[in-house]
Image: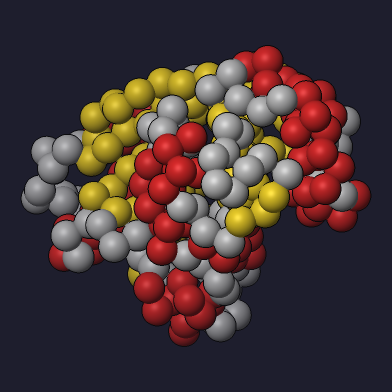
Amino acid sequence: MIKINELNHKARHLLAFSPLQYMFDMVSEKPRLAEIYVDDEINPKYCAMLLGHYLFLNGVSEDFAAEFCSTVFNEKKRKDLGVIIVFYSDKNAAEAVGKNLGKVYDNTRSLYRYAGANMNFDEKPLGGIGSATPIGEELLNSDLNNIEMITEEVLGTATYDDMDDFCRNGIGFTFIDENRICAFCTSEYPSANSLAIGIAVDENHRRRGIASAMTNAFLKKAAERKLNVFWECWKNNAPSVQTALKCGFEKVADYPVLFVNMEE
């Protein structure tokens, strides 16, 4: 097994099974953000790419799986990540890796793409409860409570080098209630042509239109940069799916994944 420094043409071809090609665009531009392994540099048959909590596998032999797990997922890595989501072309190969790491669960994720159906970016008031607030350096250095809700999301996706990088190059909005961060909508996996949305609203502020308001503000900024926007989530996450559809996204694909809990 060999670690390579960039997602070259042959390695990327092995990962062509995944619809999440926008993530690979980012890795092609910023290879340092991912760990990429192949069985042979010249004519690889297998490829494994770890990007944050996401692991992409094209096949892999039992020997490759065992070496990959022992080399990449040391005790510190398992503790730091806790869980991973495995995207695969061969379920048996994915299970060979997953079972070496922890408890494995079958699940399905879905990809949506903004279709440009909401070009007015409706900014209706939220009934006096506030509005989408841009995320920038000043906000992140303020005395607001729960800022880690934003920083943990941004840094946890392995998308930006640090929060300064995000402030310079990313797009983000939040919702503030009584000096507390209660939601975020942040850019993920940016490349020259596209990016994705990461979004969450705390339990006490859901069903108030906050997610849609942040998404619309996000889409407006992305449109100014002429970027394609993607939305990826669990297939059974009804609130997330409903927000995506409401804001003008259309489904691209559903795909099986393995959820691996390395803490069990």
**Residue 204 visible in the displayed image:** no
- In the image, taking residue 74 as reference, residue 142 lies left or right, namely left
Quadrant of the rendering where the N terminus is positioned: top right
Where residue 148 appears, as percent x and y from the top left, is 63, 64
Quadrant of the rendering where the C terminus is positioned: top right
Total numbered circles = 0
- In the image, taking residue 139 as reference, residue 122 lies left or right, namely left
Where residue 216 appears, as percent x and y from the top left, is 25, 51
Please tell me whether residue 206 is drawn above or below residue 86 in the rendered image: below
Q: Residue furthest front?
A: 42
Q: Residue at x 49, y 26 (%)?
A: 109
Q: Residue at x 71, y 25 (%)?
A: 61
Say which of 230 and 192 sits in front.
192
* Rendered image quadrant of residue 222: bottom left
Q: Residue at x 39, y 68 (%)?
A: 170
Say which of 56 and 261 sits in front.
56
Where residue 87 appears, as percent x and y from the top left, is 56, 30
**Residue 137 visible in the displayed image:** yes
Where residue 232 appears, as percent x and y from the top left, is 42, 37
Please tell me whether residue 36 is drawn above or below residue 248 in the rendered image: below
Q: Residue at x 36, y 47 (%)?
A: 22
